[in-house]
Image (cartoon, grey):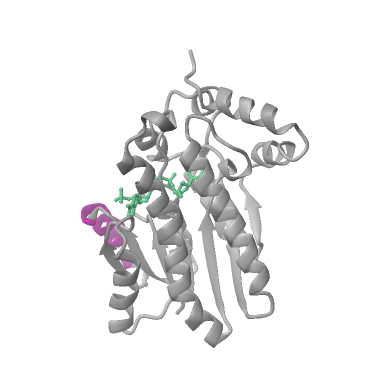
């Protein structure tokens, strides 16, 4: 049975992805900070006849990706599919944002994702088989005033993923960058964007539906996938409109809804 490692699997999109892997008979390694929530997910999924290992870890702490890799090596658990899903955003003007929030987003959304990819990729290449799913966002396609760091981290994820997907052509390893738009999860609460126009007026998709789109893209080896037709059109529109206009619209969408 193949094994999938999912970061951020204690809730939201990661949890829904874990259910899809379970349905298709994959053993799971689930990572997030909260041990109790991971335990609940394991209790729910284990009766489906798969092995579920949970590891409670703050991936934003620099040694965490290596710690995770070393622990799995020691236990002889090989990873066939890596899902870099854990991520968070913080709302507010950059000049007023705390160092912790700024560096935390960069550490989790960029550094941990890159480091986990670096660590797990060589064995996939050696086996000539493996899949990596990097969860970016439609935020990757334009600058994001009021969430400047978050949007920039997701632009990194898109660029990085597409580049290495190209490098890995013919290797047997696929890299998929998955870009959800607004989705009903714990994300907006943590980010402080529950009252934004994006979430209140434009509306969010269900985590279940979004995870299905991501899972399908991963399993078909697509390089880039955007969840939802409206999100696809919005992302494409940024390619032709003037950059200043795109940035202004992005701010309007992020602002609080009256
Ligand atoms: N929801 C949206 O509107 C939306 C839109 C586009 C893209 N995305 C992206 O989708 C991905 C999943 O987000 P979500 O919407 O499912 O959010 P979520 O409901 O907040 O889930 C985030 C997951 O990441 C884990 N996590 C957070 N910080 C962590 C850390 N430092 N170390 C380890 N695990 C950590 C959380 O568990 P613990 O709290 O237990 O650590 C949770 O399992 C993220 O990369 C996000 O940027 C979300």
User: Which secondary structure type mostly characterizes the magenta part of the structure?
Assistant: helix
In the rendered image, residue 226, in percent from the top left (x then y), is placed at 63, 48
In the rendered image, residue 41, in percent from the top left (x then y), is placed at 31, 57
Q: Is residue 126 left or right of residue 88?
A: right
- Which quadrant of the structure image shows residue 230? top right
Front-most of residues 226 and 123: 123
* Residue stretch rendered in magenta on the structure: 35-46
Residue sitting farthest toward the top: 258
Q: Is residue 118 above or below residue 56?
A: below
Count of numbered marks: 0
Q: Residue at x 52, y 59 (%)?
A: 134
Residue 240 seen in this snapshot: yes
Q: Is residue 212 left or right of residue 228?
A: left
In the rendered image, residue 174, in percent from the top left (x then y), is placed at 61, 71
Give the quadrant of the N terminus. bottom left
Front-most of residues 79 and 50: 79
Residue 216 seen in this snapshot: no
Q: Is residue 51 magenta?
A: no
Q: Is residue 258 above or below residue 213?
A: above
Residue sitting farthest toward the right: 240
Q: Is residue 42 magenta?
A: yes
- Which quadrant of the structure image shows residue 76? bottom left
């Amino acid at each position: 049975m193949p094994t999938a490692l999912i970061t951020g699997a204690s809730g939201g999109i990661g949890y829904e992805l874990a259910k899809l892997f379970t349905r298709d008979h994959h053993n799971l390694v689930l990572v997030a900070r909260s041990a109790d929530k991971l335990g609940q997910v394991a209790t729910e999924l284990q009766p489906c006849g798969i092995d579920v290992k949970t590891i409670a870890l703050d991936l934003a702490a620099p040694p965490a990706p290596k710690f995770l890799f070393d622990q799995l090596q020691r236990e002889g658990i090989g990873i066939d599919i890596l899902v870099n899903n854990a991520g968070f955003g913080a709302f507010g003007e950059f000049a007023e944002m705390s160092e912790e929030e700024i560096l935390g987003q960069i550490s989790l959304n960029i550094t941990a994702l890159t480091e986990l990819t670096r660590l797990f990729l060589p064995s996939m290449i050696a086996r000539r088989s493996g899949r990596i799913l990097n969860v970016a966002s439609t935020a990757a396609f334009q600058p994001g005033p009021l969430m400047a760091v978050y949007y920039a981290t997701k632009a990194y994820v898109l660029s990085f993923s597409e580049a290495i997907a190209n490098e890995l052509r013919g290797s047997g390893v696929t890299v998929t960058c998955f870009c959800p738009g607004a989705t009903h999860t714990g994300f907006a609460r943590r980010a402080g964007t529950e009252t934004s126009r994006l979430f209140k007026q434009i509306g969010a998709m269900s985590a279940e539906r979004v995870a299905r789109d991501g899972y399908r893209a991963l399993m078909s080896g697509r390089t880039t996938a955007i969840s939802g037709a409206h999100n696809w059109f919005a992302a494409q529109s940024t390619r032709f409109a003037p950059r200043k206009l795109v940035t202004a619209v992005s701010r309007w969408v992020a602002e609080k809804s009256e």
